[in-house]
Image (cartoon, helix red, strand yellow):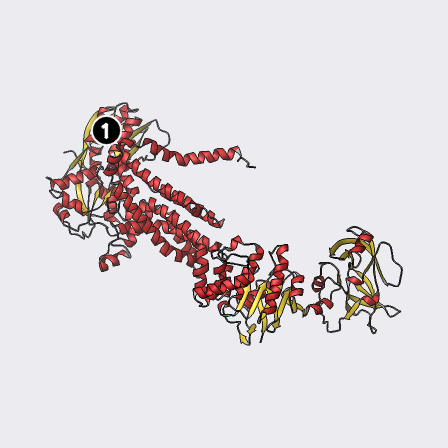
Amino acid sequence: MHRRLPLGITILALVGAAFVVLPVLALVIRAPWGDLSTSLSGVGATTALRLSIEVSLAATALSLFFGVPLAWLLARGTFPGRSVLRAMVVLPIVLPPVVGGIGLLNSLGRSGVAGQWLYDGLGIQLTFTIWGAIIAATFVSMPLVVIATEAGLHSVDRRYEQAATTLGASQGLAMRRVVFPMLLPSIVAGAVLTWARALGEFGATITFAGNLEGRTQTLPLAVYQARQTDPGGAIFLSLILVVISIVVLVAMRNHLMKAR
Amino acid sequence: MKRLCALLLATTLVIAACSSDDDGGDTFSSATEPAETTELTVFAASSLTAVFQDAIGPAFEDANPGVTVSFNVGASDALAAQIQSEGTADVFASASGTWMDEIEKDPGVSDRTDFVMNRLVIITPPDNPADIQSIDDLATPGVQLVLPAEGVPVGDYAREALDNAGILDEALANVVSNEEDNASVVAKITTGGGEADAAIVYTSDVSDAAGNDVNAVVIPEDVNVIATYPIAVVEGAPNADVAADFVAYVIASEGQATLKDYGFEPLA
Amino acid sequence: MGFRADLAVTRGTFDVRLALEAADGETLALLGPNGAGKTTVVEALAGLVEAAEGATIELDGERIDRLPPERRRVGVCFQDDLLFPHLSVLENVAFGLRARGTAKAAARTRAGELLQRFAPGVRPGAKPRELSGGERRRVSLARALATDPRLLLLDEPLAGVDVTARGQIRSLLREVAGGFDGVVVLVAHDPLDALTLADRVAIMEAGRLTQEGTPDQIRNAPRSPYAADLVGVNLFTGKLEPLEDGAATLRTAAGTITVAPEGAPGSGATAIATLRPADVSLHLERPEGSARNVFEGTVDEVAIEADRARVRLDTQPPLIAEVTAGSIARLGLAPGTHAWASFKAVEVSLHLVDQAGDRAGHPATESTATGTLSE
C-alpha cells in the first residue's frame, strides 16, 4: 500500500522544484527561437562548446589524477596537521571563485610565486591559455573528488583489506585489487560532480585565464559576454549548458546516488 | 549514508559558490542615510562609479541637506534599458551619446548637457616588460594585450583608436583577453606583477584617485578617441527639481574640479 | 610440529593472556561467552592485531609472531565471510593463489576444483551477494584453504547459516577438519559445534583460559559456571559442613544440598560439586525415600530433544533434571508447574578445593544450574 506524502511536505517539495525548474523554463520560453542560427554563430557557440568540453574533461582528469591519491593520504595517513590539510583542500569549494582566480594569478601567473620560475626559466606562461582555464577549473573542482573519495574510503570496511592480507596479499596489492575497486563508485560520483563544477566554472577562469574566443572563452564566459551584445544569444548559450548538464547528470544518476 | 551526505553537502556548496560568482556589478546602490525627505536616483555609467559615489554624491548631499543621492551604476546600454522599463531614474549620466539619444526618444530628457570627457590611455605594468612606448608598439607580434570586450563602450572606442592608428588587425592578433569591465582590464595589469603587457582603458580608470600603480602611455591626440559623457534629467523624474540641481552641480566648477581629480577631462 | 602460541594482546581496557597449543591434524575449539576475547585471539594468530612484546606464536617450529599476515601460512574463515563483493566467487577463491604468485589460469583452475568440492551448487561466476549464508560460508572455506595454510582459523563458522543448512555445513567442517594436515582452531560460542567437531576444547572467559581438555574431560569435570553451562551440568560451589552421619552439607549462595564426601573434610572447606541432570528425579508431590536431597519449586523451562527432556526448576538451589519425554507428558510438566526434585547425596560428585585454591579459582560460593538445556 503506497502511503501518500503528507500534504505539507508535498507542497514544500513542489515549491522547491518550481524554484529550480522555473528559471530554466523561463530561458526556454524567452529564447528568440527564430534567430537561432544567426545568434549562435554570432556568439561563437560551437567554439565555446568545444572549449568547455575540453576544459571540463581535462580538469576532471587532473582532479582524479591528483585528487584520489590526496584523498588516500588524508584518509589513511597519520601525519600531524592532517585536519588542517583537509580543510585547505576543501577551501576552494567555499571560496568565491574570483578569489581563487586571484590566488592563482599570484601563484602561477607570470610573476607569481611559482609561476615566475616557469616563465623566466622555461618560458611557460599559463595565463591567457587553455591551460590556464584548465588549471582554474581544476582548482575549484578537485575538492569534490577528494571529498567523495575520502568518504568512500571511510565507508569501505578495512576488514576487507585484512582479509586480503590473510590470503597473502601485500598492503599494496590489497589496496589495488580490493579497496580501490570497492571505492570506484565513490570515485565515479566524485568525478561526475567535478565535471559538472568544472563545466560551470566562471570566476576563477575569467580572472586567471582571461576571456578570448577560441582560446579561453568557455560557455559560461561566452554567456557573460553575450549578455551585453546579444541577450538572445546569451540565452541560447545558457540553454546549451543546461542541456549538456541535464543529459550527463541524468545518465549518471545511478552513480551519483549510490550510497553504500 | 555518510557518503551520500558528503555528496549532497558538496553539491550545495558548489551551487552556493557558483552563485556567489557571477557578479556583473550591475545594480549597486550606495548606502543611504536614515530617512531624509528626498532621495535622488542617479543612473551613471560604470566609469563614473568612484567619482560620483565617493566625491560628488557626498558633496551634493552636504550642500543640500535633506537630500540623499543613490547611484545605480552599470553599463550605459543596460542602464538605458532599465530606465525605459522601470522609469524610476531622476538623472542619467551616460558614457556615450548613443544611449542618451535613446532615452531622449523615450521617455525624453531635459537639461541635457555634455559634462565631461574621457580619453583612452595605454597602461602597462610599472616595469613595462614589453617596452611599450607608443601606440604603434601594440602591433609588435608577441605583445600580450588586454582590451575591454566589444560592446562595452570603452572596448569599442579602443578598437576605434587602434583603427585610427592603422594597426587594428595586428593589435587584435595580440589580444589575449577581452574583459567585461574596466576593473578587470586594469586587474590584469596590476595583479601579481602584471599578467599582460599592455591594455587600453580610460584615463579615469587609472587616475591617482583610483590609486593603482601602472605606467601610462599617452595615445596621440589624432588617433585617440574621446568619449563625451552627456548628463540629463529624465522626463518623468520623481524629483525633477533636485535632479536639475544635481545636473547643475556637476556642470559647475566644483563638480568639474572633482571630475578632473578623478582623471576625467573637463569640457574645454 | 603443530603450533604453539603464548599470547598477550591488549585491546583498550581489555587484555587477552593465554597459551595454546595443538598438534598437526588436531582441531582445537576455542569456546567462550561473547566478549571473552575469542576474536582477538583469531586476529592475533592471523597477524591482524599487534601482539605484545614477549608474545610468541610458533607454527611448524618457526616463529611467526613478527610476520605480517601475508607472510604467515594462516588461513582465516571470517565470521562474516568478507568475500570481496566486486569479484566473482571463483575470483574470490583464486585471490590467495594469485596474490602468492600463481598464474591466472592455473589459479582459476585450482579455484574451480576447490569450489566444486566445497560448494558444488554454486555458480563460479556468481557474485557473493547472490549467495545464501551457507553458500557464502562454503566459498569462504574454499578461499581460505586455497593457499594451503598450515593453520586454519574458523571464526564462528556456523554463525549466519540458517538452521536447515547447518547440518550440512557441520558435516563439511568435520570433513575438512578431519582431513586437514595442519592445525584447525575453531572459535565458537555455541558448544555443540565445539564439542562435536573438536579434538580438544579450550574455554576462554574474560581474556583468560579457564579450562582445557577433551570434550569428554570438560563434560565430566567442568571447572567454571560457564563450562558447566556449556555442558548442561548442575554445578555447585560452596562450603562444606560435616554432618554426624558422615555426610555433609554444601552451602552455596543459592541454596544448600547434602553431599557424601570421601574422607573427612574439615568444616568450612570449599568444594565444587557436579550433579548429572539424569540423576535428578521429578515428582508432582513430595517424594518419600532415601534421597537426602528433596527440593520444591516451579518449573522454569522445559526443553525436549528427541525422546529426552531437560527441565529447569527454580528450586533453591536451581536444578536441571533430565527425564524422558514421556515423563513430561505423563506428569504434565510445563513452565509454571509446581513440582518436586530429588537426588541422592552419593550421586553428587564432590571436588575439594585445596588450600592453594586450584580448580579454576572460583572461591566465591555460587551454584549454576541455569543456561543451555541442550547438550
Q: Which residue is mark 1?
A: B247
Taking the image as shown, residue C136 lies to the left or right of residue B121, namely right
Residue at the top extreme of this rendering = B236
In this rendered view, identify the residue nearer to me: C95 or C258.
C95
Residue C10 position within the rendered picture, expressed as x and y whole percent measured from the top left: 57, 66
Q: Where A113 falls versus B38 (above or below)?
A: below
User: In the structure shown, which secondary structural element does the residue marked by tag 1 occupy?
Assistant: helix
**Is A52 in front, or is A107?**
A52
Q: Chain of mark 1?
A: B
Left or right of C241 in this view: C180: left
Q: Position of residue A129 (x, y in %)?
A: 25, 50
| Residue A217 in the image: above or below residue C96 | above
Res. A90 visible in picture: no
Q: In percent of the image, x 46 and y 58: which residue is there?
A: A179
Residue B125 locus on image (x, y percent): 21, 50
Horizontal side of B137 relative to A59 (left or right) equals left
The quarter holding residue B95 reads top left
Q: Residues within 10 Å of mark 1 (few under 14, many from 20)?
A: many
What residue sits 11% from the left and 42% below the top? B165
Q: Amino acid at mark 1?
A: Val
